Image: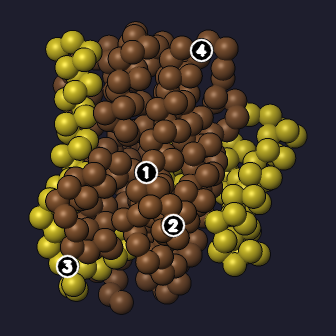
Protein backbone atom coordinates (compact mmCIF):
# COMPACT_ATOMS: atom_id res chain seq x y z
CA UNK A 1 0.00 0.00 0.00
CA UNK A 2 2.79 2.44 0.90
CA UNK A 3 4.45 1.65 -2.44
CA UNK A 4 1.87 3.90 -4.06
CA UNK A 5 3.68 7.17 -5.01
CA UNK A 6 0.42 9.15 -4.96
CA UNK A 7 -0.23 8.01 -1.38
CA UNK A 8 3.27 8.99 -0.31
CA UNK A 9 2.93 12.37 -2.02
CA UNK A 10 -0.39 12.90 -0.23
CA UNK A 11 1.29 12.31 3.13
CA UNK A 12 4.20 14.61 2.22
CA UNK A 13 2.03 17.44 0.89
CA UNK A 14 -0.21 17.49 3.95
CA UNK A 15 2.48 17.79 6.63
CA UNK A 16 1.97 21.58 6.79
CA UNK A 17 -1.78 21.05 7.01
CA UNK A 18 -1.36 18.52 9.80
CA UNK A 19 0.37 21.14 11.96
CA UNK A 20 -2.10 23.93 11.17
CA UNK A 21 -5.16 21.70 11.58
CA UNK A 22 -3.87 20.32 14.89
CA UNK A 23 -3.58 23.90 16.18
CA UNK A 24 -7.10 24.55 14.87
CA UNK A 25 -8.28 21.43 16.75
CA UNK A 26 -6.69 22.72 19.95
CA UNK A 27 -8.54 26.03 19.53
CA UNK A 28 -11.81 24.15 19.00
CA UNK A 29 -11.21 21.99 22.07
CA UNK A 30 -10.60 25.06 24.23
CA UNK A 31 -13.71 26.87 22.96
CA UNK A 32 -15.96 23.80 23.24
CA UNK A 33 -15.04 23.32 26.89
CA UNK A 34 -15.62 27.04 27.51
CA UNK A 35 -19.05 26.68 25.87
CA UNK A 36 -20.00 23.90 28.28
CA UNK A 37 -19.36 20.66 26.33
CA UNK A 38 -17.71 17.82 28.24
CA UNK A 39 -14.23 16.75 27.05
CA UNK A 40 -15.59 13.43 25.75
CA UNK A 41 -18.40 15.09 23.78
CA UNK A 42 -15.90 17.61 22.43
CA UNK A 43 -13.68 14.80 21.18
CA UNK A 44 -16.68 12.85 19.85
CA UNK A 45 -17.84 15.90 17.84
CA UNK A 46 -14.47 16.10 16.08
CA UNK A 47 -14.51 12.36 15.41
CA UNK A 48 -17.87 12.40 13.63
CA UNK A 49 -18.38 15.94 12.24
CA UNK A 50 -14.83 16.70 11.03
CA UNK A 51 -15.67 20.28 10.10
CA UNK A 52 -13.86 23.00 11.99
CA UNK A 53 -16.21 25.69 10.68
CA UNK A 54 -19.41 23.79 11.55
CA UNK A 55 -18.06 22.86 14.97
CA UNK A 56 -16.96 26.42 15.80
CA UNK A 57 -20.42 27.62 14.75
CA UNK A 58 -22.00 24.89 16.88
CA UNK A 59 -20.20 25.80 20.09
CA UNK A 60 -20.62 29.53 19.40
CA UNK A 61 -24.38 29.10 19.10
CA UNK A 62 -24.83 26.37 21.71
CA UNK A 63 -26.57 28.69 24.13
CA UNK A 64 -29.00 29.87 21.43
CA UNK A 65 -30.49 26.39 20.97
CA UNK A 66 -30.51 23.78 18.19
CA UNK A 67 -32.28 25.75 15.43
CA UNK A 68 -29.55 28.40 14.86
CA UNK A 69 -26.88 25.69 15.07
CA UNK A 70 -28.56 23.60 12.36
CA UNK A 71 -29.19 26.67 10.14
CA UNK A 72 -25.49 27.57 10.43
CA UNK A 73 -24.43 23.99 9.69
CA UNK A 74 -26.66 24.00 6.61
CA UNK A 75 -25.21 27.31 5.42
CA UNK A 76 -21.68 26.02 5.87
CA UNK A 77 -22.60 22.73 4.21
CA UNK A 78 -23.86 24.39 1.01
CA UNK A 79 -20.31 24.86 -0.22
CA UNK A 80 -19.82 21.09 -0.07
CA UNK A 81 -22.29 20.62 -2.94
CA UNK A 82 -20.09 22.03 -5.74
CA UNK A 83 -17.04 20.57 -3.97
CA UNK A 84 -18.56 17.08 -4.15
CA UNK A 85 -19.42 17.55 -7.84
CA UNK A 86 -15.83 18.61 -8.54
CA UNK A 87 -14.37 15.74 -6.51
CA UNK A 88 -16.63 13.22 -8.27
CA UNK A 89 -15.38 14.53 -11.61
CA UNK A 90 -11.74 14.34 -10.52
CA UNK A 91 -11.80 10.79 -9.14
CA UNK A 92 -14.00 9.33 -11.89
CA UNK A 93 -15.96 6.07 -11.47
CA UNK A 94 -15.23 4.53 -8.05
CA UNK A 95 -16.95 1.93 -5.86
CA UNK A 96 -19.69 3.31 -3.62
CA UNK A 97 -17.66 2.45 -0.51
CA UNK A 98 -14.77 4.61 -1.75
CA UNK A 99 -17.06 7.54 -2.54
CA UNK A 100 -18.74 7.34 0.88
CA UNK A 101 -15.34 7.29 2.57
CA UNK A 102 -13.94 10.23 0.59
CA UNK A 103 -17.09 12.24 1.34
CA UNK A 104 -16.63 11.82 5.10
CA UNK A 105 -13.60 14.15 5.09
CA UNK A 106 -14.55 16.46 2.22
CA UNK A 107 -13.03 19.54 3.84
CA UNK A 108 -11.56 22.70 2.34
CA UNK A 109 -7.94 21.80 3.05
CA UNK A 110 -7.77 18.30 1.56
CA UNK A 111 -10.13 19.31 -1.26
CA UNK A 112 -7.70 22.13 -2.11
CA UNK A 113 -4.73 19.80 -2.05
CA UNK A 114 -6.57 17.27 -4.25
CA UNK A 115 -7.53 19.90 -6.83
CA UNK A 116 -3.91 21.07 -6.88
CA UNK A 117 -2.68 17.48 -7.20
CA UNK A 118 -5.06 16.86 -10.11
CA UNK A 119 -3.72 19.87 -12.00
CA UNK A 120 -0.16 18.69 -11.24
CA UNK A 121 -0.91 15.30 -12.83
CA UNK A 122 -0.96 13.06 -9.74
CA UNK A 123 -2.06 9.67 -11.01
CA UNK A 124 -4.07 8.12 -8.16
CA UNK A 125 -6.18 10.88 -6.64
CA UNK A 126 -8.10 8.49 -4.40
CA UNK A 127 -4.87 7.38 -2.71
CA UNK A 128 -3.61 10.98 -2.58
CA UNK A 129 -6.79 12.28 -0.92
CA UNK A 130 -6.90 9.30 1.44
CA UNK A 131 -3.42 10.18 2.70
CA UNK A 132 -4.28 13.86 3.06
CA UNK A 133 -7.55 12.95 4.84
CA UNK A 134 -5.74 10.66 7.29
CA UNK A 135 -3.24 13.39 8.14
CA UNK A 136 -5.94 16.03 8.58
CA UNK A 137 -8.24 13.74 10.58
CA UNK A 138 -5.55 12.58 12.99
CA UNK A 139 -4.24 16.12 13.49
CA UNK A 140 -7.70 17.57 14.10
CA UNK A 141 -8.81 14.83 16.51
CA UNK A 142 -5.55 14.80 18.50
CA UNK A 143 -5.55 18.62 18.60
CA UNK A 144 -9.15 18.61 19.85
CA UNK A 145 -8.22 16.18 22.62
CA UNK A 146 -5.28 18.32 23.70
CA UNK A 147 -7.45 21.45 23.69
CA UNK A 148 -10.26 19.73 25.59
CA UNK A 149 -8.11 18.29 28.36
CA UNK A 150 -5.20 20.73 28.58
CA UNK A 151 -6.72 23.84 26.99
CA UNK A 152 -6.40 26.17 29.94
CA UNK A 153 -2.61 26.11 29.55
CA UNK A 154 -2.68 26.85 25.79
CA UNK A 155 -3.50 29.93 23.71
CA UNK A 156 -3.61 28.73 20.08
CA UNK A 157 -5.01 32.06 18.87
CA UNK A 158 -1.76 33.79 19.82
CA UNK A 159 0.14 31.81 17.17
CA UNK A 160 -1.87 33.34 14.30
CA UNK A 161 -3.29 30.02 13.06
CA UNK A 162 -6.09 31.78 11.16
CA UNK A 163 -3.56 33.81 9.17
CA UNK A 164 -1.59 30.66 8.28
CA UNK A 165 -4.83 29.10 7.03
CA UNK A 166 -5.52 32.20 4.96
CA UNK A 167 -2.04 31.97 3.43
CA UNK A 168 -2.51 28.26 2.77
CA UNK A 169 -5.62 28.96 0.68
CA UNK A 170 -3.94 31.90 -1.05
CA UNK A 171 -1.16 29.49 -1.99
CA UNK A 172 -3.65 26.90 -3.24
CA UNK A 173 -5.44 29.54 -5.34
CA UNK A 174 -2.27 31.01 -6.89
CA UNK A 175 -1.57 28.27 -9.48
CA UNK A 176 -5.21 28.33 -10.61
CA UNK A 177 -5.01 31.95 -11.79
CA UNK A 178 -3.88 31.66 -15.38
CA UNK A 179 -6.46 33.17 -17.70
CA UNK A 180 -8.34 36.46 -17.78
CA UNK A 181 -11.46 34.73 -16.44
CA UNK A 182 -9.52 33.43 -13.43
CA UNK A 183 -8.40 36.96 -12.52
CA UNK A 184 -12.02 38.14 -12.80
CA UNK A 185 -13.21 35.31 -10.53
CA UNK A 186 -10.47 35.98 -7.95
CA UNK A 187 -11.25 39.71 -7.89
CA UNK A 188 -14.97 38.99 -7.64
CA UNK A 189 -14.32 36.59 -4.75
CA UNK A 190 -12.38 39.25 -2.81
CA UNK A 191 -15.09 41.88 -3.36
CA UNK A 192 -17.95 39.45 -2.65
CA UNK A 193 -16.27 38.24 0.55
CA UNK A 194 -15.76 41.77 1.86
CA UNK A 195 -19.41 42.60 1.11
CA UNK A 196 -20.54 39.32 2.69
CA UNK A 197 -18.61 40.02 5.89
CA UNK A 198 -20.51 43.29 6.22
CA UNK A 199 -23.96 41.94 5.38
CA UNK A 200 -24.27 38.22 6.21
CA UNK A 201 -23.97 36.02 9.30
CA UNK A 202 -20.52 34.39 9.58
CA UNK A 203 -21.75 30.91 8.66
CA UNK A 204 -22.95 32.08 5.23
CA UNK A 205 -20.16 34.48 4.24
CA UNK A 206 -17.65 32.19 2.51
CA UNK A 207 -20.31 30.04 0.83
CA UNK A 208 -22.24 33.04 -0.52
CA UNK A 209 -19.09 34.83 -1.71
CA UNK A 210 -17.69 31.74 -3.44
CA UNK A 211 -20.98 31.07 -5.18
CA UNK A 212 -21.37 34.72 -6.29
CA UNK A 213 -17.82 34.78 -7.68
CA UNK A 214 -18.39 31.46 -9.45
CA UNK A 215 -21.54 32.86 -11.03
CA UNK A 216 -19.45 35.77 -12.31
CA UNK A 217 -17.06 33.22 -13.77
CA UNK A 218 -19.89 31.22 -15.30
CA UNK A 219 -21.32 34.24 -17.17
CA UNK A 220 -17.96 35.71 -18.16
CA UNK A 221 -17.34 32.97 -20.74
CA UNK A 222 -14.09 31.12 -21.48
CA UNK B 1 -32.37 18.51 22.28
CA UNK B 2 -29.35 17.53 24.37
CA UNK B 3 -25.74 18.14 23.35
CA UNK B 4 -25.16 14.60 22.04
CA UNK B 5 -28.25 14.73 19.81
CA UNK B 6 -27.23 18.14 18.51
CA UNK B 7 -23.74 16.88 17.65
CA UNK B 8 -25.26 13.91 15.81
CA UNK B 9 -27.64 16.23 13.93
CA UNK B 10 -24.78 18.53 12.84
CA UNK B 11 -22.79 15.46 11.76
CA UNK B 12 -25.72 14.22 9.63
CA UNK B 13 -26.31 17.65 8.02
CA UNK B 14 -22.59 18.01 7.27
CA UNK B 15 -22.17 14.50 5.87
CA UNK B 16 -25.31 14.71 3.71
CA UNK B 17 -24.02 17.93 2.12
CA UNK B 18 -20.67 16.25 1.45
CA UNK B 19 -21.98 13.03 0.00
CA UNK B 20 -24.83 14.52 -2.06
CA UNK B 21 -23.16 14.48 -5.46
CA UNK B 22 -20.78 11.63 -4.71
CA UNK B 23 -23.58 9.08 -4.24
CA UNK B 24 -24.60 9.14 -7.88
CA UNK B 25 -22.08 11.23 -9.82
CA UNK B 26 -23.20 12.67 -13.11
CA UNK B 27 -20.76 14.03 -15.67
CA UNK B 28 -20.88 17.81 -16.11
CA UNK B 29 -19.20 18.75 -19.34
CA UNK B 30 -19.89 22.32 -20.42
CA UNK B 31 -22.32 25.20 -20.37
CA UNK B 32 -22.80 27.67 -17.54
CA UNK B 33 -22.93 24.90 -14.89
CA UNK B 34 -19.66 23.44 -16.15
CA UNK B 35 -18.02 26.88 -16.08
CA UNK B 36 -19.45 27.52 -12.59
CA UNK B 37 -17.98 24.27 -11.29
CA UNK B 38 -14.64 24.79 -13.00
CA UNK B 39 -14.05 28.12 -11.23
CA UNK B 40 -15.70 27.22 -7.91
CA UNK B 41 -12.52 25.89 -6.23
CA UNK B 42 -10.65 29.10 -7.10
CA UNK B 43 -13.52 31.28 -5.83
CA UNK B 44 -13.76 29.22 -2.63
CA UNK B 45 -10.03 29.40 -1.86
CA UNK B 46 -9.87 33.16 -2.49
CA UNK B 47 -12.98 33.70 -0.34
CA UNK B 48 -11.48 31.71 2.55
CA UNK B 49 -8.15 33.53 2.22
CA UNK B 50 -9.89 36.93 2.16
CA UNK B 51 -11.93 36.08 5.27
CA UNK B 52 -8.92 34.91 7.27
CA UNK B 53 -6.54 37.68 6.17
CA UNK B 54 -8.75 40.74 5.71
CA UNK B 55 -11.66 40.07 8.08
CA UNK B 56 -10.30 37.78 10.82
CA UNK B 57 -12.96 38.78 13.35
CA UNK B 58 -15.88 38.69 10.93
CA UNK B 59 -15.64 42.24 9.55
CA UNK B 60 -12.91 43.91 7.45
CA UNK B 61 -10.14 45.31 9.64
CA UNK B 62 -6.59 46.60 9.33
CA UNK B 63 -4.49 43.93 11.02
CA UNK B 64 -1.11 42.24 10.39
CA UNK B 65 -3.17 39.76 8.34
CA UNK B 66 -3.15 42.33 5.50
CA UNK B 67 0.66 42.32 5.58
CA UNK B 68 0.48 38.53 5.34
CA UNK B 69 -1.80 38.84 2.29
CA UNK B 70 0.55 41.29 0.61
CA UNK B 71 3.55 39.12 1.47
CA UNK B 72 1.73 36.06 0.15
CA UNK B 73 1.02 37.78 -3.17
CA UNK B 74 4.66 38.90 -3.45
CA UNK B 75 5.82 35.37 -2.54
CA UNK B 76 3.51 33.95 -5.21
CA UNK B 77 4.98 36.27 -7.84
CA UNK B 78 8.63 35.84 -6.83
CA UNK B 79 8.44 32.07 -6.38
CA UNK B 80 6.23 31.43 -9.42
CA UNK B 81 3.01 30.57 -7.58
CA UNK B 82 4.67 28.04 -5.30
CA UNK B 83 2.63 27.16 -2.20
CA UNK B 84 5.71 27.19 0.01
CA UNK B 85 6.75 30.58 -1.42
CA UNK B 86 3.33 32.09 -0.61
CA UNK B 87 3.34 30.61 2.90
CA UNK B 88 6.93 31.55 3.73
CA UNK B 89 6.88 35.16 2.51
CA UNK B 90 3.35 35.71 3.86
CA UNK B 91 4.22 34.31 7.29
CA UNK B 92 7.45 36.33 7.38
CA UNK B 93 5.51 39.52 6.62
CA UNK B 94 2.81 38.66 9.18
CA UNK B 95 5.12 37.87 12.08
CA UNK B 96 7.43 40.76 11.16
CA UNK B 97 4.64 43.34 11.14
CA UNK B 98 3.07 41.85 14.28
CA UNK B 99 6.39 42.10 16.10
CA UNK B 100 6.66 45.78 15.17
CA UNK B 101 3.08 47.04 15.60
CA UNK B 102 1.53 44.29 17.76
CA UNK B 103 -1.96 42.85 17.19
Note the chain letter of the yellow one.
B
Give the residue pinned by disc 3: B28
x then y, percent, for residue A64: 28, 17
Q: Which mark is residue A3?
A: 2
Q: Nearer the viewer, residue B60 or B42?
A: B42
Q: CA distance from mark 3 to mark 2?
A: 33 Å
x then y, percent, for residue A20: 60, 43
Of mark 4 and mark 1, the one earlier in the sequence is 1
Give the residue pinned by disc 1: A133
Q: CA distance from mark 4 to mark 2?
A: 38 Å
In this rendering, does residue A214 appear at all?
Answer: no
Q: What chain is tagged by disc 4?
A: A
Q: What chain is tagged by disc 1?
A: A
Note the chain letter of the brown one.
A
Q: What chain is tagged by disc 2?
A: A
Q: CA distance from mark 4 to mark 3?
A: 47 Å
Q: Secondary structure at mark 4?
A: helix
Q: Secondary structure at mark 3?
A: loop
Q: Residue pushed farthest right?
A: B100
In this rendering, does residue A15 appear at all?
Answer: yes
**Residue shown at 43% from the left, 14% from the top:** A39
x then y, percent, for residue B48: 48, 53
- Dot 3 alpha-carbon crowd within 10 angstroms: few under 14, some 14 to 19, many 20 or more: some
Q: Is residue A131 above or below residue A136?
A: below
Q: Quadrant of the C terminus of chain A?
A: bottom left
Residue A72 shown left or right of residue A175 in the figure: left
x then y, percent, for residue A35: 42, 14
Amino acid sequence: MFDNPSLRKGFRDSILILVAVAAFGVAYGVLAIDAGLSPWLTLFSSLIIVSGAAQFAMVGLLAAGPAPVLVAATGLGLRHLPMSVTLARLIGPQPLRTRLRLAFILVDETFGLTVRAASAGVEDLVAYKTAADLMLYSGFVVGTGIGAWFGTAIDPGAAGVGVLFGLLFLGLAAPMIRRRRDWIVAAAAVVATLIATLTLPPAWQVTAAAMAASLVGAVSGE
Amino acid sequence: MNDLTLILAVAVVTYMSRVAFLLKPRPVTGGPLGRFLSVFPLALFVAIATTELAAPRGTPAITPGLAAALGGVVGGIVFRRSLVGVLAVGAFAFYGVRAVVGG
